[in-house]
Amino acid sequence: MVKLFQHTFKYEYNWDSVTLAFWLRYPNPFASHVESVDVIDRYVDPKTGSLRTTRLIMKRGVLPKWGQGFIKNPEAYIIEESIINPKTQTMITRTKNITHARVMQVEEWQTFRVDPNNREFTQVKTEAKFVSKFGWGLTEKLEGFGLKRFTDSSLKSRKGMSYILERIREKQLLRGRKLMNVYSI
Amino acid sequence: MSQSIGVNCNELKKEYDACFNRWYSEKFLKGDPKPECEELFKKYRDCVLIAVKQKQIDKLLVEARKDDPFSSITEVNK
């Protein structure tokens, strides 16, 4: 049994800002459970000119009360892969958990493109898949829980991105008057 | 800025992130893909990989990285 999630959203910010916000999105007030973010690998593909990045994200307290009984380690690690082509203005990201994967594997794909109706806006398509191999009659419950949780957390992650985008805009406006570092949010 | 997994990697991360974010906005997005933060990245990454090993997630990470999600995606380059 696999549960799927699909969603399309529009940020009222240009693609350059949205992709920068993707790098800067932690910490933000809507992601207090994210403890660390590290770049594990990063390079520009000489053939395509695309930027490939692998990041490792550590979160805490991601399980429901009834799940804490069988998961001893509250740390959860997530691997985030991304590819950005600046010529086609396309960013594709894929995140998945690497710990507790037997209980539940959540795989999320996001595609960021320039909004075809407004060059100043950015369209984001999100797709996610939930697979539990846990068994014991809990698979259904876990996958249902994963889907519900994901719906809540994807709303939070959009709020977090919007918060960062607002900070970027403020700093860019300020920079017009005074030299400010836009990148240290 | 976000924290690093390794408490003693935070300074290196801060320097690298600042360099990368500037390069990303001012060079990469403007069509200049020549890397500029390689040395800072190497130092920072070496530190992170030690922390990853200490936390015993190095094997999980190697395993997870075997699956390249974009190997069959050509859409991004169209």
Image (tube, rainbow, N blue to C red):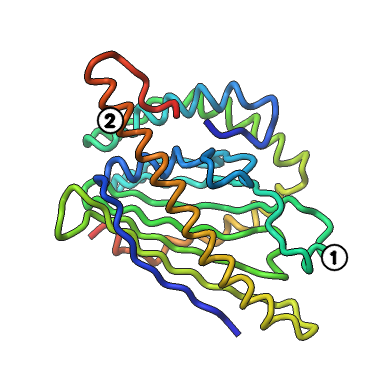
Residue A175: where, in percent of width, then height?
27, 20
Q: Quadrant of the N terminus of chain A?
A: bottom right
Residue A67: where, in percent of width, then height?
77, 67
**Mark sitting on residue A69:** 1
The local crowd at label 1, few if under 14, some if 14 to 19, many if 20 or more residues have their Cα within 10 Å, is few
The local crowd at label 2, few if under 14, some if 14 to 19, many if 20 or more residues have their Cα within 10 Å, is some
**Protein chain holding label 2:** B
Q: Quadrant of the C terminus of chain A?
A: top left
Whether the residues at callouts 1 and 2 have beta carbons within 8 Å, the answer is no
Q: Is residue A34 above or below residue B15?
A: below
* Closer to the eye: label 1 or 2: 1
Q: Is residue B14 left or right of residue A109?
A: right
Q: Three-letter amino acid code at disc 2? A: Lys
Q: Residue furthest top?
A: A178
Q: Which residue lies at the image location 62% right of the left edge and 34% below the top edge?
A: B4
Which residue is labeled 2 in the image?
B27
- The image quarter containing residue A32 is top right
Q: Is residue A139 left or right of residue A66?
A: left
Q: Three-letter amino acid code at disc 1? A: Gly
Q: Is residue A133 left or right of residue A78?
A: right
Q: Nearer the viewer, residue A174 or B70?
A: A174
Q: Which residue lies at the image location 34% right of the left edge and 18% below the top edge?
A: A180
Q: Secondary structure at mark 1?
A: loop
Residue A135: where, in percent of width, then height?
76, 82
Q: Secondary structure at mark 2?
A: loop
**Protein chain holding label 1:** A
Q: Are marks 1 and 2 on the same chain?
A: no
